[in-house]
Image: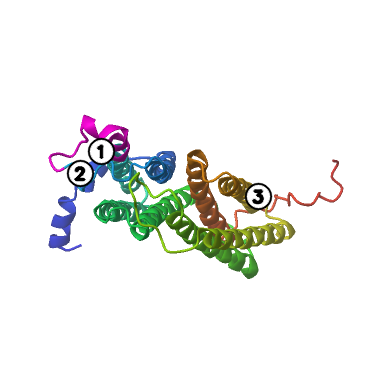
Amino acid sequence: MSSSDARRKARTPFTWLEKRVRFNRPALRWAALVAVAASVLIIVTGGIVRVTGSGLGCPTWPSCTGEGFAPTAEMGIHGVIEFGNRLLTGLLCVVVGWLIVVARLQRQPVPQVTRWAWAQFWIILLNALVGGITVLARLSPYIVAAHFLAATLLLAAATVAWHKAGQLDAPPTTDNPDASVHRIGAVLLVSTAVLLIAGTLVTGTGPHAGDSSDVARMPFDWTAVTFLHGIIAVLVGGTAVTLWIKVCTAANPTMLRRITLFLAVFLAQGLVGIVQVVTALPEVAVVLHLLGSAFVWIGAIRVYFDTRSSHLSGSEQAMCHPVNGAVG
């Protein structure tokens, strides 16, 4: 290391901290999990802002009013809801900042987690900017869709960091899924992403514009885009079932459990979606559907990583088929 490199290292705040504080792996896993939970929370609260018509509760950005950052009493509950949602950006920064600190101060370097923690930080800033543009654009449905997709991008980064933190120090294995399992897992991930994008079209065409005033909607037929969304959902479900069957025959119970959980959450999400359509989009169902979309997205990412490397040990047996000679 050159003298200039040594001086730069000496000026790094982490250099001072790492001589005094170290965190273990469980602390890192908990910090990563909290980041995932915070990312889900921001998706749900964004939905609450929309269905309560509070999108312009703070009519400007970055301040809430022309005079200050906080809402006034005259702005009512809509101002409180929108301002509370904005405050969550600060909470996200704290949570992700803590994850960065915990990852950086591991006894052994974990760059694969640290990189994704920093990715979350930059995505938070991006999402805050898109959120500001959403307000300044008077809730343009296209910007609202971009705002949601930025939030799902944050959730993806948080899920990857959580997954990688959970795989640290795992015993090496030579068992790996075959190429077809990996391909199906990739198809499941991509098709789930397409499903989320199609969902933004349904939202942008539907009645919940995010404000009680007259807000422009996307120029699509709501019934048609809802049908398209449903068709893509069927394809995602079919892909997941195909992967489930494939993993059953491959005798990998760890992966099978995760795919089974994904299917259960996905079916519940589909049920909520059907309830939305037949009951004229009640607010509670809309928020539950957003929560479900977050869980489905997390599941698709986790399943994808499972199809890339196996956690199967030699002693594990398939859950789909009884072991020869076993007593039921």
Residue 112 showing in the rendered view: no
Position of 310 with respect to 83 (left or right) is: right
Which dot, 3 or 1, sits closer to the camera? Answer: 3
Three-letter code for the amino acid on which mark 2 is drawn? Trp
Magenta highlight range: 66-83
Position of 180 with respect to 172 (left or right) is: right
Of the pair 294 and 61, the residue shown nearer to us = 61
Decide which of tag 3 and tag 1 comes sooner along the chain.
1
Contact check, label 2 and label 3, Cβ < 8 Å: no
Contact check, label 2 and label 1, Cβ < 8 Å: yes
Labelled disc at residue 20: 1
What kind of colouring is applied to the model shown? rainbow
Tell me which residue sits at (35%, 47%) in the image.
103
Q: Which residue is mark 2?
A: 16
Which dot, 2 or 3, sits closer to the camera? Answer: 3
Marks 2/3: CA distance?
A: 46 Å
Residue 64 showing in the rendered view: yes
Position of 65 with respect to 236 (left or right) is: left
Tell me which residue sits at (63%, 60%) in the image.
234
Answer few, some or many: residues within 10 Å of disc 2's Cα (few below 14, many 20 plus, some between 14 and 19). few
Three-letter code for the amino acid on which mark 3 is drawn? Thr
Q: Which residue is mark 3?
A: 260
Three-letter code for the amino acid on which mark 1 is drawn? Arg
Give residue 106's position: percent from left, percent from top.
35, 45
Give the number of callouts.
3
Marks 2/1: CA distance?
A: 7 Å
